[in-house]
Image (cartoon, coloured by chain):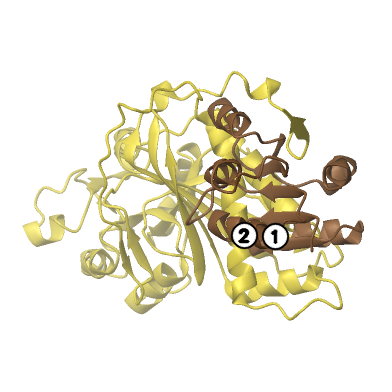
Chain colours: A brown, B yellow
Amino acid sequence: MAQILVVDDSSTVRNEVCDFLKANGLTVTAAVDGKDGLDKLRADPAIKLVVSDVNMPNMDGLTMAEKIRGELRNTTVNIIMLTTENSPSMKERGKAAGIKGWIVKPFSGAAVIATFKKLAV
Amino acid sequence: MTDATLVMSKVLVLDDASEHFTQIKQFCEDCCLQGIKPNLGSQGGVMAILRSNVDLGGILLYENYGGQAMGLTLAHAIHAARPELPIFLRRDTEASLAGLASTDANALCAAYTMSDLESFKAVLESSIFSRVYPTDLVRGITEMTLSSLQTLFKTCTAKVEAPYLVKDQIIYGEVFSMITIESNWCRGYMMLQTEEEGMLNLLRHGAAADAEPLTFRDLNSVLGEATNLVWGSFKNRYVGYRDDMTGLTQTQVPIIINHQRRYISFGSVDPQLCLKYSLIPLDDPQAVPVSVFQRFVFNLSWSPDQFSENPSVEALVDSGELEMF
């Protein structure tokens, strides 16, 4: 049972984000790409917030977000993208998939922790 | 010569005529060349330098270096080992390759004399400096890479040396990353290259005392993320979101890597933009810096006249901040 699912193909980013969230009292699980993220979310309906990279092998983060809403019919989980991408077209696609927000890497935990906590309950 | 955006190039100077030393040194400075002179003039010594210098733009070679016509013998050895490096032959009277056997001439790029260095400048412009990298681009790349390295190596200081152009195709170190960069004004690759042990030691130095032992996979991940951060910054800053990418040619060429020779070829002999970064632990400024070499190879398309900074870059949300929808 986790509150937040962190999806990133980079173990460096995954560990950094997970460690930070755990240190702030949140329960976290991690996935290595969009496909793995879908599996983890399917297996743990308690997850309230997905923090995901966009560019990943096997399945990118935006496709995963679309499948969360479509295939999984999960309309309640909050999704935030944490990515180097910053293009309006990608953000539009994210909005259409119902994602809640967008963070351009590098990750700065202090700037977002309050919002993350709000979205993870 | 410490201008952060003045693009230079390193050249190996194989010229033992002491009477011309000052003039050659001045010429190199005037032409943005950083001359490297070997201590040993023997062929073995020169080849050892070639093996240890992975970022050369070319070679200035005196025809009689080491003895009468010995320079030509050396030119053959260098050309056989590093055919991508242009060799410029200094001759006593003839500023051309005229009179040389065709087998000798084939190993050389051009010839010059001390009395006509102005003409030689033009030759350099069309060979080592045949590709112009916009100053704003070089400055931007430096800024975004330093920022990315600083993000990942929080316990280190990141520094960069003056940018330079290289024509060699030698891989530095043991590990490198490569990512495609595509826009309507450039298509090619960016590489980051480093050495495993030094970089791993840096990561271990910055890790928590109770952290799990770090392995080369952790290094791979950090280098990958550094590449990702620079790539993302490059896209956000220089690849226009409204650019019509649909008309871009999908041309590709095979990339050849020869591990034994530490050689990589992108099928292009154009000079590559190279930047050398150094990482030094904040709490040990005397430590040997760990080097990261960054190379840009725009082998598939290069139109610097169309280069521009994304006009909306100022309006973008700062990195790390959450933009709510």
Chain identity of mark 2:
A
Circle 1/circle 2 CB separation < 8 Å: yes
Distance (Cα) linking label 1 and label 2: 6 Å
Amino acid type, residue under disc 1 in the picture? Arg
At numbered mark 2, what does the secondary structure look like: helix, strand or loop?
Answer: loop
Please rate how many residues cluster around mark 1, counting C-alpha atoms within 10 Å: few if below 14, some from 14 to 19, many from 20: many
Q: Is residue B101 visible?
A: no
Q: Name the image quarter holding the N terminus of chain B.
A: top right
Q: Amino acid at mark 2?
A: Ser
Q: Residue at x 87, y 77 (%)?
A: B209
Q: Nearer the viewer, residue B45 or B205?
A: B205
Nearest to the observer: residue B312 or residue B323: B323
- Residue drawn at x 84%, y 61% as measured from the top left: A27
| Residue B258 place in picture, x, y as percent | 32, 70
Tell me the quarter of the picture where residue B72 sits: bottom left
Q: For residue B324, what is the image quadrant?
A: top right
Q: Which residue is mark 2?
A: A10
Image location (x, y in percent) of residue A80: 71, 41
User: Image check: B52 left or right of B76?
Assistant: right
Q: In what element is the residue under mark 1?
A: helix
* Number of the label disc, if any, that sits on residue B151: none
Provide the chain ID for the residue under circle 1.
Answer: A
Position of residue A76 measured from the top left corner of the image (x, y, whole percent): 73, 41
* Residue drawn 66% across the image and 65% down it: B290
**Disc number placed over residue A14 in the picture, else none:** 1
The answer to whether residue A68 shows anywhere in this view is yes
The C terminus of chain B - image quarter = top right
